[in-house]
C-alpha cells in the first residue's frame, strides 16, 4: 500500500517500538500519545476502517486489546483505560489503516469527556427504526 505509514511500519521501513506481534497484529507505542503508555494495535494487512476488516480478524482484536490494556495499566500504574477506533476522517482518523488505541488513564481530566446532552425522546424511535432498516 503506497503512502501508508502503518504499512511501512509493518514492513519494517519505519522503526517502531513494538510491545507485541502476532500473525495479524502489531502493538506499538504511539509516538503522539494521549497519555503515558498509549499503545496502537495495527493490523498487518491494510484495511482502511473497521467496515473493511474481516470478522475473523476483528474477533481477535478485542481479546488482544484486553491483554494489552491489562499490561499497560499495570506497566504505567494507571487504574483505568480507554479503547477506541476512529473510522473515517470525520471521526478523527488520521491514518487510513485500521488501528485500535489502548489508552491508560490515571485521571478523567487527562482527556476531554465526549458525553452528550439529553436525547430528544420523540425522535429516538425514528432513529432506531432507520438503523434497524439497515441491519
Image (cartoon, grey):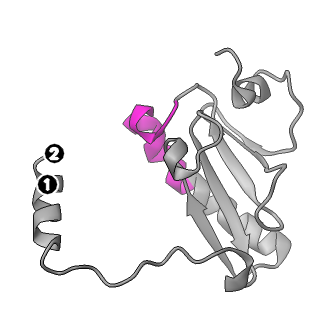
> What residue is drawn where x is 86% and y is 38%?
16
> Residue farthest to the top?
2
Q: Which mark is residue 134?
A: 2
Whole-Å distance between the Cαs marked 2 and 1?
A: 7 Å
Residue 103 in the image: state x and y as whole percent. 69, 65
Q: Residue 117 vs residue 28: left or right?
A: left
Q: Residue 83 vs residue 4: left or right?
A: left
User: Which of the pair 61/134 is nearer the observer?
Assistant: 134
Q: Quadrant of residue 83?
A: bottom right
The residue pinned by badge 1 equals: 130
Residue 129 in the image: state x and y as whole percent. 10, 59
> What residue is drawn where x is 71% and y is 83%?
109
Residue 119 in the image: state x and y as whole percent. 27, 79
Give the mark toward the camera: 2 or 1: 1
Label 1: which secondary element: helix
Q: Quadrant of residue 11?
A: top right
In the image, residue 8 sits, relative to residue 31, either above or below, namely above
Q: Is 47 within the magenta?
A: no
> What residue is drawn where x is 65% and y is 72%?
81
User: Which of the pair 110/75 is nearer the observer?
Assistant: 110
Q: Quadrant of residue 56?
A: top left
Callouts 2 and 1 close, C-beta under 8 Å:
yes
Which contiguous range is marked in magenta? 48-63
Q: Which mark is residue 15?
A: none
Amino acid at each position: 500500500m503506497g503512502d501508508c505509514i502503518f504499512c511501512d511500519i509493518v514492513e519494517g521501513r519505519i522503526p517502531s517500538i513494538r510491545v507485541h506481534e502476532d500473525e495479524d497484529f502489531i502493538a506499538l507505542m504511539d509516538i503522539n500519545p494521549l497519555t503515558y503508555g498509549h499503545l496502537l494495535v495495527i493490523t498487518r494487512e491494510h484495511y482502511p476502517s473497521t467496515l473493511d476488516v474481516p470478522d475473523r480478524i476483528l474477533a481477535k482484536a478485542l481479546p488482544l486489546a484486553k491483554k494489552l490494556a491489562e499490561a499497560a495499566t499495570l506497566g504505567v500504574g494507571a487504574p483505568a483505560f480507554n479503547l477506541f477506533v476512529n473510522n473515517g476522517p470525520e471521526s478523527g482518523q488520521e491514518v487510513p489503516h485500521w488501528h485500535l488505541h489502548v489508552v491508560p488513564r490515571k485521571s478523567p481530566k487527562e482527556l476531554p469527556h465526549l458525553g452528550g446532552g439529553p436525547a430528544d425522546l420523540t425522535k429516538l424511535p425514528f432513529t432506531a427504526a432507520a438503523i434497524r432498516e439497515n441491519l
